[in-house]
């Protein structure tokens, strides 16, 4: 039962990141009009660095695809981890209204990484 729940959660988590990555290329989800001024400045700064947004988008797409598949889930979690740290930091420091969702995503990623901890042991030892 736990494996089925983990699969469904990983599937939804992976699809969310694939969607976020694809949106960075195709802009099919418009930005909200009521973004805080700090967030508008941050997004402007990120877009000024021409290579950063495509790099994050590719990492989100690849990480999301890998997280969906049980065999590659551990690698996908490692790819998504630095992006999740960035999401958490932005929500903690600049946009606290999105913090509950960021915490839920962090907990899901933590669970995925915890369930794959044996695969990471060779990196630590």
Image (spheres, helix red, strand yellow):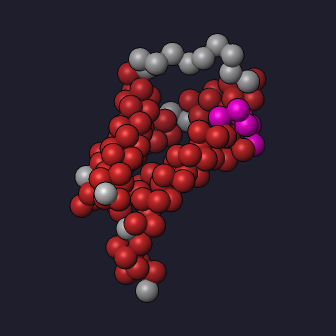
Q: Is residue 97 magenta?
A: yes
Total numbered circles: 0
- Residue plotted at (40% across, 79% down): 121
Residue 91 showing in the rendered view: yes
**Residue 99 image point, x, y percent:** 66, 40
Q: Residue at x 67, y 47 (%)?
A: 89
Image coords of residue 17 (percent x, y): 41, 39
Give whichever of 51, 63 is nearer the camera: 63
| Residue drawn at x 56%, y 35% as measured from the top left | 49
Q: Quadrant of the N terminus?
A: bottom left
Relative horizontal placement of residue 116, taking residue 101 as reference (left or right) = left
Q: Pinpoint residue 114: horizontal percent, then vertical percent.
A: 45, 67
Q: Residue furthest front?
A: 1
In the rendered structure, the answer to whether residue 14 lies left or right of residue 37 reads left
Q: Nearer the viewer, residue 46 or 123?
A: 123
In this rendered view, identify the residue nearer to me: 16 or 87: 16
Residue 76: quarter of image: bottom left
Q: Residue at x 52, y 46 (%)?
A: 105
Vertical order, 74 against 67 (above or below):
below
First to last magenta residue range: 93-98
Above or below for 122 versus 52: below
Horizontal and vertical percent position of residue 119: 34, 73
Hey, which residue is sitting farthest top in the picture? 33
Left or right, residue 59 beside residue 45: left
Position of residue 6 relative to residue 123, above or below, is above
Magenta segment, principal secondary structure? Answer: helix
Looking at the rendering, in which quadrant would you find the C terminus?
bottom left
Q: Is residue 90 above or below residue 2?
A: above
In magenta stretch: residue 8: no
Query: From where the camera sits, is residue 87 visible?
Result: no
Along the line of sight, the residue nearer the viewer: 20 or 59 = 20
């Amino acid at each position: 039962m736990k494996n089925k729940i983990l699969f469904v959660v990983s599937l939804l988590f992976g699809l969310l990141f694939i969607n976020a990555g694809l949106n960075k290329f195709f802009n099919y989800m418009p930005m909200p009009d009521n973004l805080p001024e700090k967030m508008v400045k941050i997004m402007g700064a990120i877009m000024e660095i021409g290579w950063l947004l495509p790099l994050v988008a590719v990492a989100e797409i690849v990480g999301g695809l890998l997280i969906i598949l049980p065999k590659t889930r551990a690698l996908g979690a490692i790819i998504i981890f630095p992006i999740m740290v960035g999401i958490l930091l932005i929500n903690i420091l600049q946009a606290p209204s999105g913090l509950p969702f960021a915490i839920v995503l962090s907990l899901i990623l933590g669970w995925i990484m915890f369930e794959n901890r044996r695969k990471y042991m060779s990196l630590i030892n």
